[in-house]
Amino acid sequence: MNVLNKSHLAMLGVVPLVLLLTSATPVRAAAQEHHHYKLIDLGTFGGPASYFSNGFDGILNNRGTTVGWADTPTPDPHPATCFDPDCFVAHAFQARNGGLADLGALPGGGSSQAVWISANGLIAGFSQIAEIDPLACRDQLVARAGLAAWQQARASNT
């Protein structure tokens, strides 16, 4: 039979106290390093939603400019194969300092998406173009999408 003496009992009281003190220290330090974040609603171009790509990086550059796409109030003219899940025409955007700039689409295209921005402001994405996809089913008119780039809010076909 093990017999605990007074020194063993004293140690049993000291160990929990030390553990309690050491575990409380990081909590106190973390509380002092509280960060303040600001949630910003970027809005839309009159439609119901706005979007960001699901990439790991590239939607925000070091200048604080972010890119994505937002719905307009115009229904997608190709409802069988909508460009966005909610079937509204959407345009690529660039947001900075509280302003939302509509980057538009390539000539003849309805919808566009901006999915990446570089450190110097070059934006890459997709845009519908003024062509119907010849490989689509005959009963479905599908506007083709092509790669697009925007530099200083001007779209170009890449």
Image (cartoon, rainbow, N blue to C red):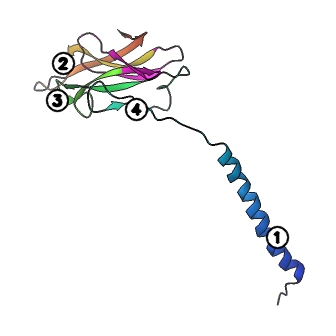
Alpha carbon separation for disc pair 2 and 1 = 80 Å
Q: Say what amino acid the circle numbered 3 marks.
A: Pro
Alpha carbon separation for disc pair 1 and 3 = 72 Å
Residue 86 shown in magenta? no
> Viewed as shown, does residue 146 lie left or right of 94?
left
The residue that mark 2 highlights is 134
Which element is circle 4 on? Answer: loop
Quarter of the figure that contains the C terminus: top left
Question: CB of mark 3 within 8 Å of CB of mark 4?
Answer: no
Q: Nearer the viewer, mark 4 or mark 2?
A: 4
Which element is circle 1 on? Answer: helix
Q: Compare marks 2 and 3 and give the one earlier in the sequence.
A: 3
**Circle on res. 79:** 3
The residue that mark 1 highlights is 14
Alpha carbon separation for disc pair 4 and 2 = 39 Å
Q: Quadrant of residue 140?
A: top left
Is disc 4 surrounded by few (<14), some (14 to 19) or many (20+) residues within 10 Å? few
Q: Nearer the viewer, mark 1 or mark 3?
A: 1
Residue at 30%, 15% in the rendered image: 105
Q: Please state the extent of the stretch shown in magenta in the rendering.
A: 93-122
